[in-house]
Image (tube, rainbow, N blue to C red):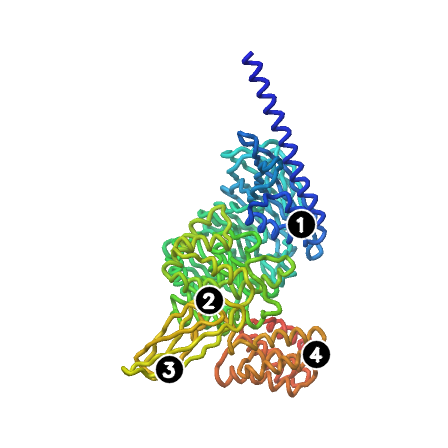
Amino acid sequence: MKKISSLVIIMLVSLLASAQDKIVKTTLSDLEQSVNNGDIDQSLTFFNHDKANLNKEQKRYLTNLAKRDSLEYSLNVHTILHSENNKAATAIVLETAQYWKYGRTKTDIGFKTYNLKQINNQWVIDAVEERVYLKGKHHHIEAEFSPKEGTMKAMAAVDLEIVEDGEKTILFWLNRGLKIDKIEDAKGNAISFKRKDLAVIIPWKRELKKGESLSLTINYSGYFYNEFKELGYGLVNISEEGVFGSWGTDWYPKLNGTLSKAKALLQYTVPSELTVASVGRFEGKIEHNGKSTYTYKVTTPMDYTFNANQFVHYSNEIDGIQVNVYLLNGSLEKAEMYADRAKEMIEYLIQIYGVFPCDSYGISEVPMEKVLGLGGSGGQGLNYYPTHTLRDDTFEFPLIAHEVGHIWWGGLVNCDIHSGKLLEEGMAQVNALLCYRHFYGENSMWDFINNGSSMFSKSAKFYFRQFNSNNDFPIGVYDEERSHDYAVISYLKPHFIMAMLMETVGYPTFIKGIKRIIAEYSANKRLNIEAIREVMEEESHQDLGYFFDQWFYKAGAPEFALQYKATKTENGRYLVEGRVNQLREVFKVNAEIVLSNDLNTITKKLDIEESTTSFSFLIDFEPKLVQFDPHHKILRWSDKVNHLNLLSEGLKAYYSGNKQQGLDKLNSYIQHYPYDPTGHVLIGEIYVNEKKYDLARKHLQFAIDEYETRGTMSYSTPLAYAILGNLNEIEGKLNEANRCFTKVLSMVNIEGSHSMAQQYFSKINK
């Protein structure tokens, strides 16, 4: 009787589980259908309404998903696990979103965990998390490149570890220009697979089990496709000009998910005249039949970047870490200078972050014409810089500091899928400002944050030029329709916000928080804005909700006006009374008020969180000057920047057909900023287009005179020479044109200035 009762219970439990499986699958199927129909309101009905953050996060995610062209969305349930009371279930789901972008298909694919529970007799989704189930252990890649043909062939032996149960598919990424010839298991048996543009999908014959290891051998061949060409840059190439592949371009089978980094033995075979730079440590070179095979050993798990060309090479070392410089244009002395300065920077950054997650660090040049408008590219141990970007006599401090920052931000730390670029670029720029603070002092750091440098324009100044009340947006909320603006602002605003956060919590606390983020988010967790807030709140013991709300989740920046009067008291001291008014939206800030005369300076702090804040200071001297935030430690509108947007608005109006309106705005910009070379160069270019050559020459010559007579080199100087060269050619002044374009080629390449010069000389030679 007991046996029969037990059997009945087992049957009932089984039937109940089967019924729940059906409910779970139906719920996810209905969610899938509503997303494909673009009905986001209907989609949100499947989630637990009592969880505000879950609903807000899913609304953002699904809304952006639905904006994609020709979306095909699917949720494929692999495994369902039930709770003991059968009131909850966990579904392991393969989520696929295929859509059109830039005239080709793009597939986002990966596993997620959907937790569902029964509330009031209805099953709802209670949590959704990205699922990491595969970890790279070791790769052995043998790749041979044929520059003349523009092709490659390779074998990748990949060892994997399963870190979670329940999946029935293995996922890789591979550059869409590369064809998989075959995939084999450890015994040499052929394995079937599917391709969806970059995604390699390997259905497994059974459910994967946690703790087991797998070995696959993938043979592939073909060419490199530049996935980023519509964004104006390139990170892969196989040609006689150069052979290179960044880890982010999937030039090898890269594991899907956050645990793709692995140890490796990397072997590159190239024509013997080429030298191969790579992540890892150089193990040796073998010559054979006019070819060379370079071997690199990766002992610190990472993703893989390489660069092959005819380099000038210099190397030094710090604590067992090689620092290499590979130049296409330049002398051994230049390579040594860059290696030595980079070594100093690496030494400091190891102290800041507490870890250097690579076997080596390399600066390498790539041919300018093959990377389009790329300024520089960070990577996991090997950076790319286009030819004519690194000056011969000047270490490109801010550019190198930014790109080396990607070793940690985007390399070691994986960022949120949607806010990834914002955080990766923003935190790499934080790396640059920390380097400025260490090597040049705090005042230089704030000047860099606000104004950039002569050859590095990413700054608050550029932010106020590009964004204003008409087009600004909350940077903490990703919008698919504004992806370009999102990419632009990622270089301009987040690092300033983080600098203000550093002021708010204090430098020592900020660095403790940064080290903790590096330690906690270097595995399989993705960093997002809220995670930064959580860490900094715990380290500082402050409620930073207001700070993150106003700077990340509200658009724009504040503007302040200060009024004061100073009265001498009976005891000979001075009472300084006044108020600070906010002229735009109200922000909460802690501002510096600096009072000074010829002999004295004192700094007071003022908490501001209302539209008007009064203050009263008793000091020992009569102030001649009372300044609000004189070092611009608050991202704010001021007389200094209030008219910068005239430049971008003028260019936009002119090139959209409103020529006179555009010219009026540009001339107004020049009136407000008469000593800014950039404004003169850009309006000079437009006057060339308008065939108003005298006006064009006047403005272009202003920028050139700033360089030739005052030695003021700016971002716009090479462009000024290039445009003046075009003007001289138009007017038949070929000697002057030759001089201008020769000058261009002796400078760094800015905004395509070298291309303009090369086109001119090619035409003249013909």
Look at discs 4 and 1 and give the one toward the viewer: 1
- For residue 668, which numbered disc appears in the image? none
Q: Which residue is mark 2?
A: 609
Q: Quick one: SS at disc 4?
A: helix
Q: Amino acid type of disc 2?
A: Glu
In the rendered image, which residue does mark 1 sit on? 40
Residue type, label 3? Ala
Residue 731 place in picture, x, y as percent? 68, 85
Q: CA distance from mark 2 to mark 3?
A: 24 Å
Mark 2 vs mark 1: give the one in front: 2
Q: Nearer the viewer, residue 512 or 439?
A: 512
Quadrant of the snapshot with the N terminus: top right
Reading the image, the residue beneath label 4 is 659
The numbered mark, 2 or 3, whose residue comes first in the sequence reads 3
The circle drawn on residue 566 is 3
**Image height of 69 relative to 118, above or below:** below
